[in-house]
Image: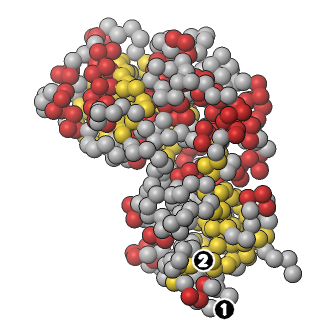
Amino acid sequence: MSETLAPIAENLWTQEAEPTLLGGQLPDGKIIFPYPEGDAAEGVTPYALSRKGTLWSWTRQDFKPKEPYTGPEVFEPYLIGYVELPGETIVETRIVGASLEDLKLGMSMEFVVTRFNDNQSTYAFQPEKSS
Amino acid sequence: MNNVYIIGAGIHPFGRTEGRSGRDQGVFAVRQAMEDAGIAWEDVGCAYGGSAAAGSADIMVNELGLTGLPFINVSNGCATGGSALASARFAVAAGEYDVALAVGFDKHPRGAFNADPKSYGLPEWYGETGMMLTTQFFALKIQRYMQLHGISRETLGKVAEKAFRNGEKTDHAWRRSQIDLETIMNAPMVNDPLTKYMFCSPAEGGVALILASEKKVKELGVSDAVKISSIAVRTRPPGSFEVFSPSVDIENGGKPTVLASKAAFEMAGIGPEDVDVAQLQDTESGAEIMHMAENGFCEDGEQEQWFAEGRTELNGSLPVNTDGGCLACGEPIGASGLRQVYENTVQLRGRGGERQVPNDPKVAYSHVYGAPGLSGVAILER
């Protein structure tokens, strides 16, 4: 599915079989997301973030945001949250493959690229499928 | 630094006023504040003011009079009013002026605020994918806080219930009728766990405060001047969790509110236990709960008990948001922080009428919070 969709932004996640979000590492070792633009990128090393983490917080967006939101014309509530990537950073993300009732503090989450609108894909995390 | 006093306070009712611009609501508030202080526009030495969405303040001289005074526009987001007040206080404390004006006003379109990613130094995709909403941030912050510190959904509802109960008694409030707990809890969800009655709405309004030196207070013979004991404005430290953050440091850092609160208490030489009435930023129900702890009034998690016992009611041990706060008054960004100081001035002068807190309050505390992670605290004493 996501192969036919254009990423919402370039260099937000890596283009490989198992993509990861692209963060940055500051000279002091601290890891940030996203990789900064312009002068702020000076001295920041690109850093491929972990694909797995734990749920830090969450909510559901129940009303259609105003511009610059470019989601589907017909609005469906969506989940967002923060996922802590151990030893790295805590990233804000869409959450897919779950309903509000499924979400619990500290549950295991994994990275996924997902459909955003008719033409574009975005990144998300989903509850980790237990193997 | 010299002592600085509030000698006049004016407010244009908050809410929706068709046909009156935001700035005209500011002018209305300035005229009321001058009348309250017993001074004329010619007596005002300098002025600081602004709005987030209703234009520049200095054009007010067209209505108020071309006296040649320096009028400095303040554009500091949610801290616009607080920064105007801090600046006006510095001008008087430094001895440069005997009378200064701080004014804030605004007029926002209906519906949630929408922010432009570029103006916050953020990439376009952050806005496009629907993650750049202030309401989400507040929901995400209280969701985690509830899990960690055992705050119930019902307590979120009680915060809103109290706000509308106090708003009913407040002539400048927008929402002036009570809403019962069940209605609040069962209202449509905006961002889980917060329903629509647990959020404040963008609104309109104006507030003006006249500040004066001790010399001027004596000269005018003002008997009910309120002393500004301290003002502290702080931006976010590393590792804090703030609105519009695509990522958060894993090392939990400080909070701008904690920094501003500590600085303000230290400057005033008092502690949280000395405060008789407090106005705390309540953009939504969860914010009031978390800000009670961040400002040092209770420990994390104790709010559950506080609300069960009604300790922040008008007759409680620490009345909080006595005019209904942002929840009942709405949020005109440029005026909101000054409304809190206005309300504290009303309470300290004993002019609160139906909403007056008992026992002759002596110390009043106000706290404003906003994007991109800043807090302003003002402590007043009578």
Q: Secondary structure at mark 2?
A: strand
Q: Nearer the viewer, residue A20 or B168?
A: B168
Residue shown at 77%/45% (left/top)?
B149
Please name the residue that numbered disc 2 is placed on.
Answer: A115
Earlier-in-chain disc, 2 versus 1: 1
Q: Nearer the viewer, residue A38 or B253?
A: A38
Query: In the image, residue A114 lies at what x, y percent?
Result: 63, 77
Quarter location, residue B358: top right
**Residue bearing the label numbered 1:** A17
Q: Position of residue B159 (x, y in %)?
A: 65, 33
- Callout 2 crowding tier (Cα within 10 Å): few <14, some 14–19, many ≥20: some
Q: Chain of mark 2?
A: A
Residue at the image position 55 percent from the left and 34 percent from the top: B327
Residue situated furthest bottom in the rendering: A17
List x then y, in percent, for residue B290. Answer: 65, 42
Please state if B160 lies on the left or on the right of B93 as rendered: right
Amino acid carrying label 1: it is Ala
**B299 relative to B243, above or below:** above
Q: Are marks 2 and 1 on the same chain?
A: yes
Of A29 and B252, the residue lying toward us: B252
Q: Is residue B73 visible?
A: yes
Q: Residue A28's image quarter?
A: bottom right
Q: Is residue B236 left or right of residue B24?
A: right
